[in-house]
Image (cartoon, rainbow, N blue to C red):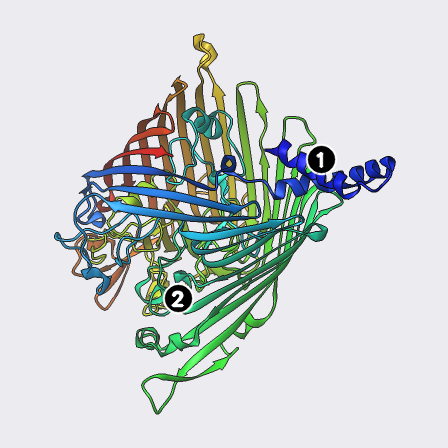
Amino acid sequence: MRKKITSLLLASCVGASWALTPQLQLDSIHASLDTLSSNMESTLLGKDDLPLAVSGYMAFRLKNFHYSERSPWTGSDYARTPVDALLNMSIVAMPNSYVTLWTNLAFPFDLSGTYGNLLSKTPTNAPTEDERVLWDHSTDYYGPTINEEFNVGVDIRAGVFGAYVTAGGVIWANSSPLTMWERETAPRFSWQYELFEDEKTVSTYYKEKSFKPVKEGGRAFWTNRSFGGLFMNFYQLPWNMTAQFMLSQPIDADMGTRDGLRLYGGQPGELETYGMHDFRGDVYHGRIAKNKILDNLSLGLNYMGVVFDEGIVYEKDFYSQWDAVKVQPHLLNTHVASLDVKGNITPKLYLMADVALSITDSMKYYKSDESSFIAGYEKSSYESALATPQVGVYVKAQSKYVEGWPMTLEGIYLPKEFYSPYSMSNPSRFTSWRKDEMYLNAGSLRYTPNMFGLNFKLEPTFNRGYFDLQYGQHRQVEEGDDVLVFNYRLNGRNMWESTNSWTKHKPLFNADSGNANPRANGYVARTGVQHRGTGVKMLRQKGGLYGGTWEMWESFVAYEDAEQIRDSIVPAHTKWSSFVSLMGGYDIGHWFGTDRNIMMTAYASLSGISTTFTPLAYSEAQDDMLLWSFFGQFEPTIAITPKFHMVGILGLETFRAENAYTTQSISNTILKTSSLVTQVGTSYFVKAPINYMETAIGLGFDWDFADRAGLHVRYKWMTHSDETLSINDWHSHYIAAETKVWF
């Protein structure tokens, strides 16, 4: 095909210059060679020149959870077996060489029974025995929804111009680190077979995750954010320019009837919409960039804006929750602009830098005396400091000057009021959450506002193995509330999936099995922020377990004494985050005289949050340590045959925090009265230091049982021990099996 097009183009050049002398004809042809290749590429047909092509996959999944020793917080989910399936199709049509049309469709199936729609009217009710819902896809109960991508698009190209427009439920895009970007530096283990794994053979899958891990790039380290709406990408423009524009109205931007009330929001996952909108929030994005500056650099100008519909405040369910705590309702509209540069300074030095300006247009509402509705508002009257421009800076440099020893250095500076909801600086990824809290591993694994520091990575490889060293030190710019949040890395995803509250796409539920009462038969949580924002769901920081995107989180306040809880005083310090991790792998196949890979991989990390600088967080007993954690995981992977690989897991994770309390009703008998510290009304506050230990051991395999078809099976035995409150202890079996067939 390429030869045919080349011949046609050459013939056209010769034909156009037939009247010229032979030498001038040759000069004309040679002058056209620079643009010949790009012009030819822009007119090539894809999919082997077929005008219509269909590809995709069919997946069947089975999961079984069984708590052999269960805690009350698991409620009715001590044993559960969900079964579902998914048909995902990508259809591409090419009417001519200049236009390509496509659509991505996904059809999920719940194979565990019938579907009832009662909960579409009462979404906060627990399911009954007569109904089945698509837990793995959505908890809004509007009907069978979509999985990951549901969109249409058209690609138009001609010469030096190329652009595509796409619209639909999930649009993947990024622009710059501080405007639209995803950041996840945690390792991806072979043990976790992701729902979104691209088509690849088993041996390729293990090579990229265990034998020779891919450190950046690809779906394992996705830097894109997901949106629902309209996206235009001009990927080829004259003078090496590119541009992109987006208008999105994702359901996660609705603080009124949806996220702000039912709390079915939080971190937007890979599902943004399924054909219905309330049009309560708009996300605007634009980027224009100049590429090939000094051959390898790109300079981009970016904008990201989130604007809410003022009509939200007229919904009774919205303004009535604010009245409950005597706080005036408010909306926060965010605008972020940035200038970024990225590319190779030299062949061995890569640089990415972004300087951003964040500003918030705040609106506070008040009730009118003449009406029960809110009838007026004031602009820029709520926390006026937010309207002051805030400057954030991110820099990343990667060096390969030392042969075989690549190094990466990252630096960050974000003021306390800097806010960019869809950037790497927002770990919650929800546009209206501006909580003052500190994450374990902050800076090294997740950025948050009110932070500056450095993160260093060393990633050498050698014959038959590799190791990675990561070290980070980050400090809050100014004093912040001692609200601490940590995620369960070893077993968190399986813990979250085991509850009927779990949903991959719409997280931030209380992890209480959907219907457990935390005062009676739920999780006995360490106390969080009391009273503040009690009636406003978006502002709650009550403490306890919360779900995330494939994660389980826990939060608490590091109170210095029970009197602070009694008086609703949240302690505050300028805190430090210390992190170090070491990961290494070695292929021992040659020890047994075989050319099959037998990879032994180990990962360990130490992390802590303290009120003073701590070079290495090695113990919870260190001075001023508020929260400390150790995480270790050993993962052997064995290539039995090129099409059949086995993987194992052996892990341990601990969390320690001395300044933790629990709040209980006097009628509750979980805690002994001899531990009573302070009693107020019908409640008492008991010091309950966090001393958790989690373990995991498991075995699994991945098998290409046919061409373009695989079977992936995992079994895992997990335990959780709470030394202070044994009622939270549990033991659990986890079994997962998935078969995926590509076409």
Residue 254's disc is 2
Seen at 19% across and 46% down, the residue is 77
SS for tag 2? loop
The quadrant holding residue 408 is top right
Quadrant assignment for the N terminus = top right
Measured from the top left, where is residue 25 in percent x and y?
82, 38
Please state the total of marks drawn on the protein image: 2
Seen at 67% across and 35% down, the residue is 6
Q: Nearer the viewer, residue 454 or 236?
A: 236
Looking at the image, residue 665 sits to the left or right of residue 476; the answer is left
Residue 611 seen: no
Q: Nearer the viewer, residue 174 or 602?
A: 174
Name the amino acid type tagged 1.
Pro
Q: Which residue is mark 1?
A: 347
Q: Is residue 30 above or below residue 599?
A: below
Q: Is residue 442 above or below residue 304?
A: above
Looking at the image, residue 532 sits to the left or right of residue 207; the answer is left
SS for tag 1? loop
